[in-house]
Every structure is written in structure tokens, then in C-alpha cells.
């Protein structure tokens, strides 16, 4: 019998139903290589046939991205410590790294992928950091403005309170000049806050801080000059509020409300009393606390070191108390306990009142706020 079927053609089999998995993979890889080679040949042809213009465009785009990356890196360095939210700097760092990685790719890869996405992402991250820097600078200006305002208020208080008290008028005049000069810094700050110029904002913050330093120094100089005239001892400091603390800033001592101290130190004094009660079973005995200017004037005797001159006493600031009940004598259990425990509650026995001090006064105790530098 003669067969009518023909034999299959001999030769390499095309990938299909009868192909093995390996054959199919190899065929797919061959097709990918062919496509890439075709694209590369096309690109080269375009660059060649298009002449220098096409080549210049590709290289110019790379140069632009490189310049953009360099500028972004400079901004990243400049923004250190000048943004509130560090995540913006982290994002910019990531985009700079991405741009560096793109620029490191072969020319053909850059041509095929393009740099538009990389450049746009880098621009967005750069803008975010610059915006964050502007907002941070605005905050710095506002804080510096507030600080200068507080310094101006203190300066005015000292200037007005020293009138006619014998302080050097040249010193007072210099303080008045410093007060007047702050107006320019304030005007510049207002102008900078109305815009988004980073350099102007940073300059305004610096100028405000400088003005604050100038006016603070002039105020301190006047305070020292008034000290020299009013307070006979080096450990005494003249203060315009001494004996003139507003009623709203004072608070009665709970177990002896006839005496008052400054409200912001009352809690610490109550805590000290509670610990004293736990040890001795009684409250601290109060013999004196806040004194008005007039009360200090009545107590003051220039021939005696016991009471400070009006304006020079921490009693007048509501930051000192005189304690009895055994504390008024050195080396008693009560005095010794206070020496060992008062500091834990923010109260201290000043050096001038120690047994070997200028005026030995075991009964005189002060809040640590009265002598912040000691």
C-alpha cells in the first residue's frame, strides 16, 4: 500500500506547541536581542543622519540635568538646620541620588529612557526644600521679633524707672539710642515677612537678633550703673520691679495668707513645706515674705546691713522669705534639715547669709530664681 502522507520538513523547529521550554526561552531571548539591536541601530542612524543637532540635544540635556543636580546638592547643604521637617531634605537626597544614577548610565540608555521624569522629580524636591527653608526663616523672624519686643519692654522699664535715681545720664542716653534704633530692624522684618525672599528673611532674623543683643547690653549696663548708685553691696541687684510687683503676679502662702510670694514659685515652696511637715509635724513659720517698696524703705537703715536698700531686695521681688520656728538659728535641727533639703525644691540659703557671709542670717531663704547665675 502506498502512503499518501508526507514526511515533516527537516530543519530547526519554530517555537510552538512541540517546542521544549528551553527552546522557547532561547527563542524569546533572541527576539529581545534583535529588538534592542534594531532600536540601537535606529538611534545611531538618527544621530548620524540628523547631524550634530541631535547629538547636541542629547548631550545638552545631560549637561542641564548635571547642572540641576549640582544646584540641588548645594541647596541640600545650605538647608542643613534650616528646615522644620527633615523629610523634605531626605526626599531631595533621594532625588539627587536618582539623578546621579541616571547620569552614570551609558549614553544609549539615557537616550532611550529620557531624563524628563528625573529632572521633574528633582525640581519638585528642590522646590519643596526651598519652600521649607522660607517657612523656617519666617518662623525665625517671628521668634526674633518677639524676643526683641521683650527686650524693648525691659529696656523701657529700666529707662523709665531710673529717671531721677542718680544713674549716669550718658548710660541712660545710650539705652534710649538703642531703643530708637530697633525701629529700623522692625520695619525691615515687616517687609521681609510680606514676601518669600529667603535671603531677605534670613537677613531680617539676623538684624533682629543683633538689635536684641545691643538693647540687652545697654539695659544691663544701665542696671549696673543703677546698682552702683542704689545698692551698696556687690551681691545686691537693683530691679525696677522690686517692691512694685503687680498684684496679679503674687499669691498668698496657703497656711499663712497674710504673707505673699511670687505666684510662679508658690508651688515649689508648698512642696518644701510639705516635706518639712513630714519631718517636724508643723508648717514652716513665716516671719516675712514679699515687701512693697514703701515697706522696704521703712526697714532700710543705711548704717545697718540687715535690710537691703529699696529696689535691691529679693523680698521686693517676692522671691525671698524669712523663716522662724527654729530655722532662725544656725545648727538647729530645723535649719540643718533645710540646708540639706531646700535645694531639692528650688530654694536656697544665699552665700551672704551663711555663718561666714556678709550678713549671717539663718532665717533668710530665697528661690533659686532670685539668683539664676549662682
Image (cartoon, rainbow, N blue to C red):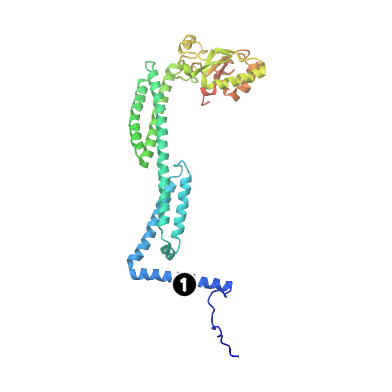
The local secondary structure at tag 1 comes to helix
The residue that mark 1 highlights is: 34
Q: Is residue 331 visible?
A: no
Work out which residue is located at the far top of the displayed protein and give it.
298
Residue closest to the eye, 159 or 289 = 289
Counting from the top left corner in percent of width and height, residue 71 is at 40, 51
Q: Residue at x 39, y 32 (%)?
A: 145
- Tell which residue pokes out farthest to the bottom in this image: 1
Q: Considering only vertical position in the picture, is 163 above or below 61?
A: above
User: Measuring 46% from the left and 55% from the top, which residue is drawn there?
Assistant: 98
Image quadrant where residue 244 sits: top left
Q: Callout 1: few (<14), some (14-19), or many (20+) C-alpha neighbours within 10 Å?
A: few
Quadrant showing the N terminus: bottom right
Query: On screen, 164 above or below 147?
Result: above
- Is residue 53 visible in the rendered image? The answer is yes
Asked whether 119 or 212 is in front, the reply is: 119
Q: Is residue 367 left or right of residue 220?
A: right
Q: Name the quadrant containing residue 103.
A: bottom left
Front residue (pair 250, 285): 250
How many discs appear?
1
x and y percentages locating residue 342 in the rendered image: 60, 22
Name the residue at 34% across, 37% down. 194
Residue 131 drawn at (x, y percent): 40, 44
Amino acid at each position: 500500500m502506498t502512503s499518501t502522507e508526507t514526511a515533516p520538513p527537516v530543519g530547526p523547529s519554530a517555537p510552538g506547541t512541540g517546542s521544549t521550554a528551553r527552546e522557547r526561552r532561547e527563542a524569546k531571548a533572541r527576539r529581545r536581542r534583535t529588538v534592542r539591536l534594531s532600536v540601537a541601530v535606529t538611534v545611531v542612524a538618527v544621530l548620524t543622519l540628523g547631524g550634530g543637532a541631535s547629538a547636541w540635544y542629547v548631550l545638552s540635556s545631560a549637561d542641564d540635568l548635571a547642572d540641576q543636580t549640582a544646584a540641588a546638592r548645594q541647596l541640600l547643604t545650605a538647608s542643613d538646620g534650616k528646615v522644620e521637617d527633615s523629610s523634605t531634605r531626605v526626599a531631595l537626597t533621594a532625588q539627587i541620588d536618582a539623578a546621579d544614577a541616571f547620569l552614570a548610565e551609558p549614553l544609549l540608555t539615557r537616550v532611550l529612557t529620557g531624563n524628563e521624569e528625573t529632572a521633574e522629580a528633582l525640581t519638585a524636591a528642590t522646590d519643596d526644600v526651598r519652600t521649607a527653608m522660607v517657612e523656617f526663616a519666617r518662623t525665625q523672624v517671628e521668634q526674633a521679633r518677639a524676643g526683641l519686643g521683650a527686650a524693648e519692654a525691659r529696656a523701657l522699664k529700666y529707662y523709665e524707672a531710673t529717671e531721677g535715681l542718680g544713674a549716669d545720664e550718658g548710660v541712660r542716653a545710650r539705652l534710649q539710642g538703642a531703643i530708637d534704633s530697633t525701629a529700623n530692624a522692625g520695619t525691615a522684618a515687616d517687609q521681609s515677612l510680606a514676601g518669600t525672599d529667603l535671603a531677605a528673611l534670613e537677613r531680617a532674623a539676623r538684624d533682629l537678633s543683633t538689635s536684641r543683643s545691643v538693647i540687652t547690653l545697654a539695659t544691663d549696663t544701665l542696671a549696673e550703673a543703677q546698682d552702683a548708685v542704689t545698692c551698696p553691696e556687690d551681691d545686691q541687684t537693683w530691679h525696677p520691679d522690686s517692691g512694685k510687683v503687680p498684684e496679679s503676679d503674687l499669691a498668698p502662702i496657703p497656711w499663712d495668707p497674710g504673707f505673699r510670694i511670687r505666684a510662679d514659685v508658690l508651688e515649689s515652696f508648698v512642696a518644701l513645706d510639705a516635706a518639712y511637715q513630714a519631718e517636724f509635724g508643723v508648717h514652716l513659720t513665716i516671719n516675712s515674705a514679699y515687701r512693697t517698696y514703701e515697706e522696704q524703705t521703712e526697714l532700710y537703715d543705711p548704717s545697718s546691713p540687715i535690710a537691703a536698700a529699696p529696689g535691691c531686695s529679693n523680698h521686693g521681688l517676692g522671691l525671698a522669705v524669712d523663716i522662724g520656728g527654729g530655722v532662725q538659728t544656725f545648727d538647729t535641727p530645723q535649719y540643718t534639715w533645710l540646708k540639706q533639703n531646700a535645694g531639692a525644691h528650688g530654694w536656697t540659703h544665699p552665700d551672704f547669709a551663711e555663718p561666714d557671709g556678709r550678713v549671717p542670717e539663718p532665717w533668710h531663704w530665697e528661690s533659686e530664681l532670685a539668683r539664676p547665675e549662682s
